[in-house]
Amino acid sequence: MYLEIEGTIKERIFTSFFKELLDKNVQYCVLRNYHSLPNSTNGSDLDILVDRRSLSVFYEVLNSIMHRFNGSLVSAIEDEVCPKFCFCNKNWGIQIDVFIDNVRFGNRDLIPVNIIWNNVELYNEISVLTSKLGSLVAFLKELLNNRTCDDKYIKKLVNYYEKEEIEPALLANFHPAFADKLNEYLRNKEEFNFHELYKLSKLTFNKSIYQGFSNKIKRLKANPGYTIAFLGTDGSGKSTLIDSIRPILNEAFHKGVYYEHLRPNKFPSIAKLLGKKEEFDGPVTDPHSKEPSGFLGSLLRWSYYLLDYTLGYMLKVFPKRASKSCVWIFDRYYYDYRIDKRRTRVNLPDWLLRLGQFIIPEPDLIICLGADPVSIHSRKPELTLDEVKRQVSVLSEFCSANKRAVWVDTGQSINQSVNDTMTAILKVMKKRFESISKFEIV
């Protein structure tokens, strides 16, 4: 259902967007992954090169189209070279990377700009970079940013250049040794040695550790990433709901949706440390099968996992959340130590568990899922009905007391539950970026 709705709306959005760019004589071109346009981006983000002289009109059109289709700006990364914008609706998402004047690494153009604009053509009434040059740009961009390259980009490059050398003018900004080695690999049909190519590329494309530092500081201030925790007893619909919203968020935050169970999982579970089977290895069919540890055992268990919620979070979650447009989804979270002590095998006083709640980084949004206990129990009878009633009641009280928490009734249809969940998510995301009424490069 999502794909059907998403495809229809995306086609209307892109058709209108590119038509207005054409009508207003905006000088732009889509750099890659355009063969499914205007129907969709085929699961990719949209990379658009825009001439700086057309930039203000381009942003006006982008604002107008997103407003027309009820799209909200949910994340943005300011950058003088390539700002990124994430838009989302209850049914669709789009990430747009805007390359200003040229495709660069640091402050250096990958390809001379005159060559870029001389290799633009129309595809379905959309200005695009020719596939041949686009394959080279995509390869170079992936190599410099990731030190490697996906097979799909290599195959396209080989398809166009295995029978002819890449013209010197195309690689004029690279060291001659890099151009020679790349052509050698293509000519001899050898497997690419990315370490060697990357090393040669750094002879000319070498960023200073201070380069882009001001942009990184801006990202910390803008806080482009989010954390969302889903809470609820077994049978409340967590997995179903998470699976339903992930495609939408994946479209808005391209390659930026991460999933974790209960905690950041930077540190291994105690069971794994002891050489035993993982405590959370697939669906849990009997969550209360093990007795809680004694006080000392509970304290040690809680203290170890508290380290994962704090230090583990700072090492694993925070770096991406603070610098990248992304969403971390947690299926359960620290609060389960209070809501379902038996599952977590931690039997400690509530005041101590509350203290831990003040120490850990709390999610930006906590989705509390609940319904009629009898209905929940009928879906998954692993717990007794009385236990389900107790957990639903405790979760309801927790939700009422926590300003970051929102209650979603999963006793209604899945479509309505998804709608309510996306409404809550968009409310949080829109608020963070509502001050940006007009896109400007600072």
Image (cartoon, grey):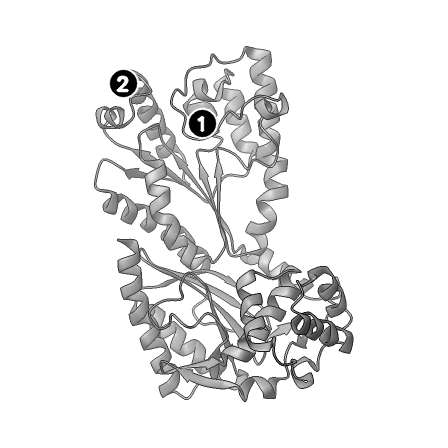
**In the figure, is residue 100 to the left or right of 190?**
left
Answer whether residue 95 is visible to the viewer in this image. Answer: yes
Any part of residue 106 in sight: no
Please tell me whether mark 1 sits on a helix, a strand or a loop.
Answer: helix
User: For the residue marked with disc 1, what is the amino acid?
Assistant: Asp
Residue 178 point in image, percent of width and height: 74, 73
For the point 62% across and 81% down, the residue is: 164
Closest to the observer, 214 or 123: 123
- Count the numbered circles shown: 2
Q: State the separation of the CA atoms marked 2 and 1.
A: 18 Å
Is there CB contact under 8 Å for labels 2 and 1? no
Residue at horizontal 35%, vertical 82%? Answer: 20
Give whichever of 187, 298 is nearer the camera. Answer: 187
Residue type, mark 2 in image: Leu
Whether 265 is drawn above or below 146: the answer is above
The picture quadrant where one finds residue 108 is: bottom right
Residue 360, how many percent across, how many down? 55, 35
Front residue of 434 and 210: 210
Label 2 neighbourhood size at 10 Å, few (<14), some (14-19), many (20+)?
A: some
Q: Quadrant of the C terminus?
A: bottom right
State the residue at coordinates (49%, 18%): 345
Say if 438 sits above or below 365 in the image.
Answer: below
Of badges 2 and 1, nearer the viewer stands 2
Residue behind mark 2: 385
Residue 178: numbered disc: none
Crowd class of label 1 (few under 14; some 14 to 19; many from 20; radius 10 Å):
many
Q: Secondary structure at mark 2?
A: helix
Q: Earlier in the sequence, mark 2 or mark 1?
A: 1
Q: Residue 349: horizontal and vertical position, in percent? A: 50, 16
Q: Which residue is mark 1?
A: 336
Instruction: Tell me: 326 left or right of 268.
Output: left
